[in-house]
Image (cartoon, rainbow, N blue to C red):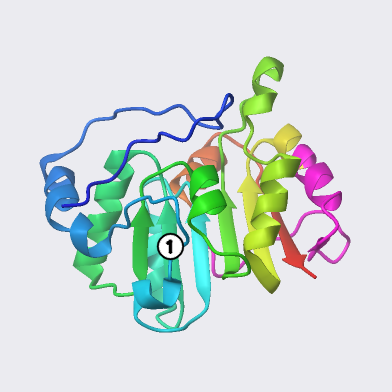
Amino acid sequence: MDKPTQTAHARSVRSFVTRAGRLTAAQQRALVELWPKFGVAFEAQPLDLDALFGRRAPRVMEIGFGNGDHLAALAKAHPQCDYLGVEVHRPGVGRLLLGIEAQELTNLRIICHDAVAVLEQQIPQRSLDEVLILFPDPWPKKRHHKRRLIQAPFVALLADRLKTGGVLRLATDWQPYAEQMLEVLDAALPLANVAAHERFMPRPAQRAPTRFELRGERLGHAVWDLAYRLI
């Protein structure tokens, strides 16, 4: 039986710290019983996404989906699209599996592995219509900036996996990281800023506030949304 894999991609600098976390009994049950149906084992070869979902449809990937509530809501609201979530933390994977079961979702699959390795080795070129990266770790200390996910090589990898016309959507509640995102993405020539004035944009109507966003609002944090289209 395939189980969610632990991150094993050999990179000197990671954008995350693997936390064991505490699995509830329900999440543990989901990892045993529901993973074989909705989980995708990491393998160093491209996925056949049409075979995985049993159809050809617009494909959306969310990187670092946290507890999965936002991704499940999207899949429920847009049954005409297929969704692929990537997350390294098992409690979040277990929670989303429970959400898939409870809402009877058929258009959502999960990979429990390092998103960089998944994109490099498992996602075919020009196969994604949209990529979501919402509230990635800002690594606020200067000595940790090298750990930030949004760096030029990663953005180039994302652009290679997007279809022409596909959109990369990001959000952060950390303004210095938002400014770095803007600088990195503006320098990625295949990508064009969707915002009218080529800065930030309002939160898209289809994106419900995440728990991180709601927490930030309670603390008085602003939120910066970005969207870039592959041209």
Front-lying residue, 222 or 67: 67
- Residue 200 part of the magenta-drawn span: yes
Magenta highlight: main SS: loop
Q: Please name the residue shown 13% across and 50% down the image.
A: 32
Whole-percent x and y of residue 111? 37, 53
Q: Secondary structure at mark 1?
A: strand
Q: Position of residue 79 (x, y in %)?
A: 40, 80
Quadrant of image for the C terminus: bottom right
Query: 206 left or right of 181?
Result: left
Could you tell me which residue is drawn at 30 percent across and 55 percent down? 96
Residue holding disc 1: 84
Residue drawn at point x = 71 percent, y = 43 percent = 153
Evaluate whether residue 102 shows in this view.
yes
Residues drawn in magenta = 179-207
Mark 1 neighbour class, 10 Å CA radius: few under 14, some 14 to 19, many 20 or more = many
Whether residue 203 is visible here, answered yes or no, is no
Q: Amino acid at mark 1?
A: Leu
Q: Residue 103 sits in which quadrant?
A: bottom left
Is 15 in front, or is 157?
157
Q: Please name the residue shown 74% across and 67% down the image.
A: 229
Residue 211 percent location from the top left of the image: 44, 46
Q: Is residue 202 left or right of residue 105?
A: right
Quarter of the image where one finds residue 159: bottom right
Q: Is residue 201 magenta?
A: yes
58 left or right of 112 in image: right
